[in-house]
Amino acid sequence: MVVMPAYNAATTLEKTYRDIPPASADEVILVDDSSQDDTVAIARALGLTVIEHPENRGYGGNQKTCYDEALRRGADIVVMIHPDYQYDSRLTPFLTAFIEAGVCDVILGSRIRTRQEALGCGMPLYKYLANRVLTLTENLVLGQNLGEFHSGFRAYSRQVLETIPYHANSDDFVFDTQLLVQAVSFGFRIGDVPVPVRYMAEASSINFRRSVTYGLGTLATLLRYLAHKAGVRRDPLFEAKGGARTTTPINP
């Protein structure tokens, strides 16, 4: 299933949806976070499954509803696509194929194939530099080798979402980082594939102040992971659903 956490996406939703290859998803679920435009009306006209939040719950809070509903409806693989047309949703089947083949449990769409391409597509220089520094730090701390950790185009296996206590995560943008750090903590296999990205006026993008908050939240999450791993502090972010503590990888 494809899930779309939406907020004021009326101008880009249909283009994003039309690019999803028809055979690549059984259902598309849009969770509207109290938009002030016609996002809900357009989603219903397109035949999407629509869930409305009566009040804005934040980006992370929106995703919690997305994943809850996808699991409730029996999804085996859940793909998150931002409905702002920033990511190329034609590549959805390429993300899911790695999970279907049993190669990975989480797949990210990496925007950083080359510096020239990322900047040429409109990524602001400060975001590119911050992305590189944070990704390098995350790879070192978590023992990974990903092109980037901060993509909003990603796919998860059902087991990942059934195991990770994502309701303990932030309702803000750092939710994405927390979910990946949790995936590492529980031993899930993470990979990435290159995807083009579009930076434009219609695409959602957090401002500089929110970006700084996000970066600090990412570093704080890494510190929490290290403290939990060292046994210094037992952290609810890294306790499997049901309270069991995972000490060995689920997929060794």
Image (tube, grey):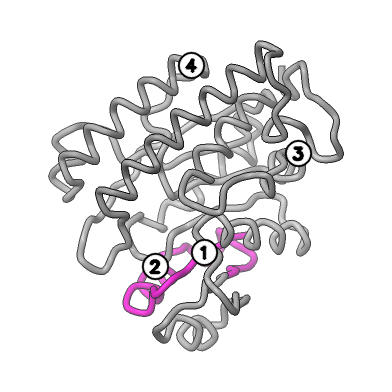
Determine whether 39 is above or below 56 in the image: below
Q: Residues within 10 Å of mark 2 (few under 14, many from 20)?
A: many
Q: Secondary structure at mark 3?
A: helix
Q: Secondary structure at mark 2?
A: helix
Viewport quadrant of the C terminus: top right
Q: Position of residue 125 (x, y in %)?
A: 15, 40
Work out whether mark 2 precedes mark 4 in sequence or the reverse, and give the earlier one: 2
Residue wearing tag 2: 16
Work out whether mark 3 precedes mark 2 in sequence or the reverse, and give the earlier one: 2
Tell me the CA gap for discs 1 and 3. 21 Å
231 or 114: which is nearer to us? 231
Residue wearing tag 1: 4
- Dots 1 and 3: beta carbons under 8 Å? no
Tell me the CA gap for discs 3 and 2. 29 Å
* Residue at figure coordinates x 78%, y 61% from the top left: 72
Using residue 104 as the reference point, say whether residue 149 is left or right of it: left
- Which mark is nearer the camera, 1 or 4? 4
The stretch of residues the image draws in magenta is 1-29
- Dots 3 and 4: beta carbons under 8 Å? no
- Which mark is nearer the camera, 2 or 4? 4
Tell me the CA gap for discs 2 and 4. 34 Å
Residue wearing tag 3: 163
Residue type beneath disc 1: Met
Tell me the CA gap for discs 1 and 2. 10 Å
